[in-house]
Amino acid sequence: MKRTKLLIPGPVELDSEVLLAMARPMMGHRTPDFEEVLEECWRLLREVYQTRNEVAIITGSGTSAMEAAVASVIKEGDEVVSITGGKFGERLAEIASAFGAEVKRVDVEWGSTFAVEQVESAIAESNAVAITLTHNETSTGVLHDARAVGKLAREYDILFIADCITSVGGDDVRTDEWGIDLCITGSQKCLAAPPGLGFVAVSERAWEVITNNTRRRAYYLDLARYRKALARGTTPFTPSVTLIYGLRAALKKIEEEGLKARIERHRRLAKATREAARAMNLELFAEQHCASNTVTAIKIPPHLSDDDVRGVLKREYGILVAGGQAQLKGKIFRIGHMGNVTFADLVQVLSALELVLKKAGHQLEPGKGVAAAEKVFSG
């Protein structure tokens, strides 16, 4: 099987130590040995989350953690303010609706971010018990201001549910300082662990709501069950032992690199990608004051197709970048520079992209994009 190099917003390339960790012999999930593995994962997760809160580990994708967060605190008929502006912001709103919430959407143009006044007005005009936000919207390449939303949530005494699936471990996510009550992430993004695990860091305010919510409509994803298990140093249901081996190894790699250094690496990769795109005569999709540090969305030139760019990159160079979603399908492509991506990886995709674009008839000066990226890293 021909190997494809992944430069997408998850799943990401795995470190060899993570792959080897998953080849370890199986152990009983209700044993002291496995409890030690879990305890180390919880400790390292709290460091990456920048929190003192308990973190639930769920065997399921990031969406399972989104659903657990919403289902555990929202009752049928509750009002929820949801900031959209992308595929995943909309997903949180859809999950809230699925659990019977009356959702008041703050619709944001894709590629832009919200105005704080717009959000505050929506909260003030509602009886909302919670507000939802996707911090880093990979469908558009936009990073939203979670700190500002947390401040509003505190002022209006409502819960803040934040999808930080593509920011925790790759960008600055200050869970406690920003007042995020339910902070959600997934394993296969910036944490650079295998797909299949979701996490929710839960504040004491949120635990109080969960405890008092006698109308929870989840079973497997009921966070109250996870808290009872956390008190015993375990999980409420059989976890994916193999994936947790990989998670521990991935979190140790983050600890070795240092969270501050890791965030800076992601920011430099993002800046280098944006500068390279401009140098290739390409137009960025997201507004620059709110551009993501873990994925860059780039408009496909009007005279080219998605296959001219992404298709040729994969067929001829074995490099996979992501396409657009929903109304952006065929209009943008997205380069993921999260997890273990290095400058060398970025140069590889940028140089291949220059060749692909040149072959397709796009006007650019060969080598100029790579040179722009090199300038970022040499400066």
Image: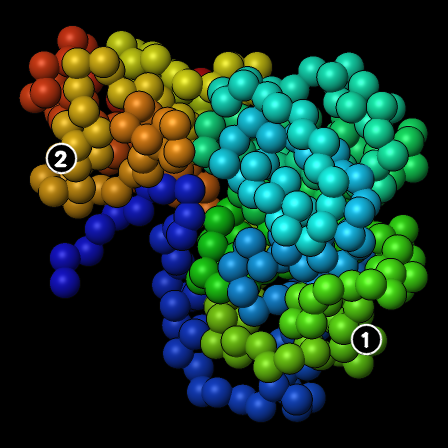
Asked if residue 371 lies left or right of residue 130, the reply is left
In front here: 338 or 90?
90
Residue type at the position of mark 1: Lys
Label of residue 27 in the image: none
Label of residue 312 in the image: 2
Q: Quadrant of the N terminus?
A: bottom left
**Would you identify the image quadrant in which residue 377 lies?**
top left
The residue shown at (37%, 63%) is: 16
Q: Quadrant of the C terminus?
A: top left
Q: CA distance from mark 1 to mark 2?
A: 51 Å
The residue shown at (63%, 76%) is: 37
* x then y, percent, for residue 171: 59, 37
Circle 1 Cα neighbour tier, 10 Å, few/some/many (<14 / 14–19 / ≥20) = few
The residue shown at (69%, 15%) is: 115
Does residue 347 lie above or below 331 as drawn?
A: below
In front here: 335 or 206?
206
The residue shown at (48%, 49%) is: 189
Residue type at the position of mark 2: Val
* x then y, percent, for residue 338: 45, 41
* x then y, percent, for residue 305: 18, 24
* x then y, percent, for residue 158: 87, 39
Asked if residue 67 lies left or right of residue 217, the reply is left
**Would you identify the image quadrant in which residue 64 lies?**
bottom right
Residue at which label 1 appears = 228
**Visible in this render: residue 230?**
no
Find numbered disc 2 in the image and state the secondary structure of the residue it sits on: helix
Q: Which of marks 2 and 1 precedes in the sequence?
A: 1
Asked if residue 352 lies left or right of residue 204, the reply is left
**Colour scheme in use:** rainbow
Find numbered disc 1 in the image and state the secondary structure of the residue it sits on: helix
**Would you identify the image quadrant in which residue 307 lies?**
top left
